[in-house]
Image (spheres, rainbow, N blue to C red):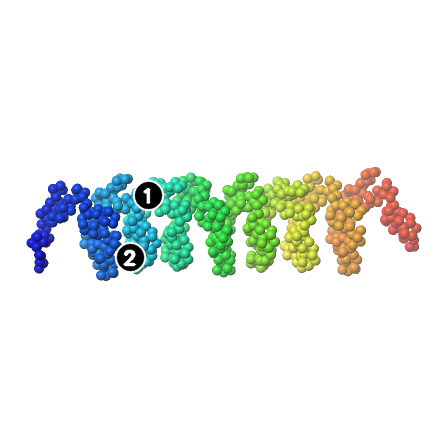
Amino acid sequence: MARFSQKYYLNRHVRTHTNGKPYSCHICNAHFSQIYNLNSHFRTHTNEKPFSCDTCGKEFFYKSHLKVHFRSHTNEKPFSCDTCGKKFSYKCHLKVHFRLHTNEKPFSCDICGKKFSDKSHLKVHFRTHTNEKPFSCDICGKAFSHKSDLTVHYRAHTGEKPFSCDICGKAFSRNYELNRHYRTHTNEKPYSCDECKKKFSRKDELNVHFITHTNEKPYSCEKCNKRFTQKCNLIVHIRTHTNEKPFSCEICNKQFSQKGTLNAHLRTHTKEKPYSCDMCNKQFSRKNELNRHLLTHTKEKPYSCLICNKQFSQKGSLNEHFRSHTNEKPYSCEVCCKKFSRKSNLNDHYRIHTNEKPYSCDVCNKQFSQKSTLNQHFRTHTNEKPYSCGTCGKEFAVKSHLKGHFRIHTKGKPFSCDICGRKFSQKGNLKVHFRTHTNEKPFFCDTCGNQFADKNSLKRHFLIHTKEKPFSCDVCGKEFSHNSDLRVHFRTHTNEKPFSCDTCGKEFSRKNSLSRHFRTHTNEKPFSCDTCGKAFSHKGDLTVHFRIHTNEKPYSCDVCNKEFSRKNSLTTHFYTHSNEKPYSCDVCRAQFTQKHQLICHFRRHTNEKPFSCDTCGKEFSRKNNLDRHFRIHSNEKPYSCDTCGKKFSRTNDLKVHNRSHTNEKPFSCETCGKKYAYKIQLTIHLRSHTNEKPFSCDTCGKKFSDKSHLKMHFRTHTNEKPFSCDICGKAFSHKSGLTVHYRAHTGEKPFSCDICGKAFSRKGPLNAHFRIHTNPKSFSCVVCNKQFSQKCNLYNHVHKHEN
């Protein structure tokens, strides 16, 4: 039985049993069991606060409130939990906390039945049904359902952050934000999932996580019926329909639909990176970036696709991947209506229309429309290559390049063309290839208007105008306009040939060289001329061939202004001015102006003939020799004379033939001044001065100054006569004999005397006849010195001395 020292205390205690409240307020008629409670209540009407804090000056209605407030200065927490030892400043807080252990929720809502461990929580919850917001801000008029929210909101106007972290000094406007922040130092995770036992530092994170087990999405959009697990996500989603962007940047005025996005954007101005990795100390401006980065250390991929079982480290990545199965593209561009499966891709695409480049390089100030592109670019300064191939160890600056490279080892080509079935290892290459069917060239040069199917070709082309060569070889100093050309060139020093043919095993330093070589096995010619229908195995050959029809010669010599249809022809021609021969043979030290000339020359030493005719099996050391030879079987003569219409199988034959009309003889002998239409004729003629005869017969040892003479001589041993007359069947050992003989049937005499007009079927008789008019007797007898105008007359005369 309770005992009391005074009757007053006993009466007051009895009222707790009888619920008697004899004291009432004359203003609001509220009743109280004790008079001091009435006095304290009356101060709410008079706004009298007789109790003030000596430290901060804050005033209170009740003395008990002052005592409790004072503990915020002394940090006194006299009430501790017997179960977990946690301390509290207020006894009521301890009671509410203890219900976490007992799971007691004595207060329930009369409308929805939801239970709460704290009465104040029930009051606040009840206002969600009544929509009552009794607390309003004096500055902006915004209303709140409970006072604490108003107090916190008011700090948004005053900028007050009364709660600061003892460890790092960071300040917060709300106490629970400080407590939540403090767990980042202590790594405390007091909330655990009953299903999977996963722990969380925040209760709201636990609630969101728990929905992954129940798959509950209680919040749905009224316009598109999309459902969400959290109300805040629904609010943000609705702004995609209303296009509302209530948060704007004070520096650049850019607007955002989410406050978090604004905060992250502000860090692009302040360069602040508040989130750091505990393992490698790398810093990040966004927390989700830190979370993504942490998974690179833990290698954890908790999200898996239900269709293909592919695993992901982030749920957002799983959702984006799932759209590859459903082909869903929920984000569309308002300008061109192009659709995307990712919102980030839409944002990046939209900058094509606005030409916005918000990311700039701190080293060279180059600007980019995407942050990932800036990161890739920055590695060109740091030379960082964080991605390495597990098979060959090759390193790459870009992850997509590593993926594309890895398919070299796996031979994977997952992307195929719907039209021709050709397969590619990279999706970008498929897109560029597809434009060969559509003839689409979306990239054009601002200087000359030339159009290109891919952006890289445009960049390479633009260097023709700027003459820029930013890449130089560390070994020989040679400069290049493209990094790929430098890499290929460097292999000439290292002799590296990473690309090999699966059929014959031949190795190449360039991938396109391997592709071209492979067509020699498949005999594939995918590029055809629209004008004449001729097919080619290489696109470059088609481009050069097309200039035969257009007579285009885009390459001109800076010294003599001579124009060429091929760049390598210009390069070769330029050596005639510089007299430079950069390629030399290791065997005989012969020098050449072009590398392919050296390669073809070297086959003379190795006797290699890699090109063979499919018809007769004849082998050749050069491909162009094979092509010319093949025209013997096909009887193809693609080159015709504009003057007489005569056709030729080789372009050189046409050039030489044209000199018969122009009477041009560009090659002259420095010794006697005699001129020739063909360089080979000059070479043979020079041997008449040097008496050089480099070609000898293996049978009889006779020597000749001309290889063709040796071939004709050799037929005297073999009695071979490969040239026969179609009319009488007479055979000849060389073609010129057949040509002259054929004139006996046709009566053709193409050689005529300029003085008397007499015609001859051969040039030799014309020369002998011409001496009748000029009276030169250049042939003399060594016995009697008698002179003759013709060599045959001298021979007949000499026989007289011999007889």
Say which amino acid is labelled 2: Tyr
- Disc 1 target residue: 238
User: Position of 586 compared to 104: left or right?
Assistant: right
Q: Which residue extends farthest left?
A: 7
Residue 660 in the figure: left or right of residue 129: right
The residue drawn where x is 36% and y is 41% is 248
Residue 254 percent coordinates (x, y)? 39, 41
Q: Quadrant of the N terminus?
A: bottom left
Count the labels in the image. Answer: 2
Residue at image location 91% in from the left, 49% down from the top: 785
- Residue at image point 80% right, 51% down: 689
Q: Nearer the viewer, mark 2 or mark 1?
A: 2
Apparent side of residue 545 relative to residue 314 in the rendered image (left or right) = right
Residue 671 is left or right of residue 96, and the answer is right
Tell me residue 632's x, y (percent).
Answer: 67, 50
Local crowd size for mark 2, using a 10 Å CA cut-off: few (<14), some (14–19), many (≥20): some
Residue toward you, 299 or 337? 299
Q: Secondary structure at mark 1?
A: helix
Q: Which element type, helix, strand or loop, lies under badge 2?
A: strand
Residue matched to label 2: 191
Please indicate, yes or no, whether residue 193 appears anywhere in the rendered image: no
Q: Position of residue 74 (x, y in %)?
A: 25, 54
Q: Earlier in the sequence, mark 2 or mark 1?
A: 2
Amino acid type assigned to the residue bearing label 1 in the image: Ile
Residue 609 placed where, x, y %?
A: 66, 57
Question: Relative to 483, is 223 above or below?
Answer: above
Q: Is 68 situated above or below 141?
A: below
